[in-house]
Image: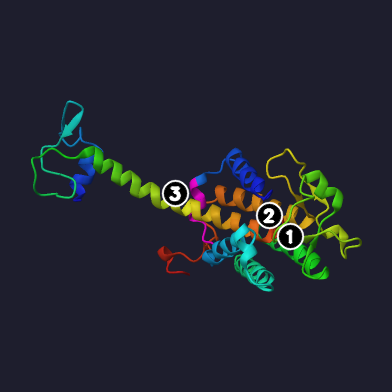
């Protein structure tokens, strides 16, 4: 993603985009996976989903690992008996 | 398993104290895979699958996996709550070693927890006069309550340490804390 595409997909209205049937259309091609070519209509929703998921999944994974590790430590040191 | 209440309580207190769940992702727990591996070994050991091990293997696996997890605690002992977890683990270990590798359970506590008649791999036993009796499983979460079980004072310390750790981690951006004087922006001076 070019910086312009990142900015434009985050704020399509500011970037001069127009909205048709709920979908944003940007003035320049900015398609998911292809910054230079395409019909010009950005696949905004998949892109936003991917960006959001990439952000969330790593943080969520890290949170989950921290919690799992602490729980594992407590369970092992507590247990060895009658689970 | 009652110690999982500590996880829930820690998260609840952490949120009520203004902490944020996502900050747990910033915690740098060293050697964490060892802790997960230790738990996996013990899950197998104390499941029906553990009955298939040759004699002598379960105690060995138990000791090795517990020692591995204890090493993780010691490695991270500078983190908040971890010293308390280490102390609780030490008390449990003392009671276990003093009683020949088993954690004695009070018969009344076992009855209260509804676990008096269970069988299978366990390092929990009932003996007439346990050594270091106050450190053994003399407490119980009564049957009917989820995760009902017997527990020791060491378990209580582990649970409190867990709550402390979670609350501290949720309230601060970075653990372990970095020295504020050492910063890339000022040349580390």
Earlier along the polypeptide chain: callout 1 or callout 2?
1
Q: CA distance from mark 2 to mark 3?
A: 23 Å
Residue furthest out toward the right: B129
Give the camera-side residue of B47 and A28. B47
Per the rendering, the mark at residue A60 is 3
In percent of width and height, residue B77 lies at 64, 65
Residue B103, image x, y percentages: 78, 62
Is B102 or A14 nearer to us in this picture? B102
Please check whether the numbered discs 3 and 1 fall on a single chain.
no
SS of the residue under disc 3: helix
Q: Does A22 appear above or below B182?
A: above
The span picked out in magenta is B22-30
Residue drawn at the location 77% of the way across and 42% of the way down: B142
Residue on which disc 1 sits: B88
Out of B63 and A62, give the one closest to the viewer: B63
Asked if the stretch drawn in magenta spans residue B23, the answer is yes
Image side of residue B117 versus residue B33, left or right: right
């Amino acid at each position: 993603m070019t910086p312009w595409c990142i900015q434009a997909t985050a704020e399509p209205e500011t970037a001069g985009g127009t909205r048709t049937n709920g979908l944003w259309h940007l003035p320049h091609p900015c398609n998911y996976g292809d910054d230079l070519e395409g019909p010009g209509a950005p696949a905004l929703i998949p892109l936003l989903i991917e960006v959001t998921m990439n952000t969330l999944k790593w943080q969520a994974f890290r949170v989950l690992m921290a919690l799992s590790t602490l729980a594992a430590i407590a369970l092992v040191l507590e247990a060895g008996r009658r689970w | 398993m009652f110690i999982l209440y500590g996880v829930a309580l820690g998260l609840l207190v952490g949120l009520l104290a203004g902490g944020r769940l996502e900050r747990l992702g910033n915690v740098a727990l060293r050697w964490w895979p060892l802790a997960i591996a230790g738990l996996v070994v013990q899950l197998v050991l104390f499941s029906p699958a553990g009955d298939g091990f040759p004699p002598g293997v379960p105690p060995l696996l138990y000791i090795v996996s517990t020692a591995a997890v204890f090493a993780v605690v010691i490695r991270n002992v500078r983190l908040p709550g971890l010293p308390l977890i280490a102390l609780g683990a030490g008390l449990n270990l003392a009671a276990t070693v003093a009683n020949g590798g088993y954690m004695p359970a009070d018969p009344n506590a076992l009855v209260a927890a509804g676990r008096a008649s269970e069988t299978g791999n366990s390092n929990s036993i009932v003996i007439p006069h346990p050594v270091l009796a106050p450190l053994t499983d003399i407490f119980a979460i009564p049957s009917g309550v989820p995760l009902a079980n017997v527990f020791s004072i060491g378990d209580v310390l582990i649970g409190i340490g867990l709550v402390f750790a979670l609350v501290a981690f949720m309230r601060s951006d970075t653990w372990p804390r970095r020295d504020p004087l050492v910063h890339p922006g000022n040349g580390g001076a």
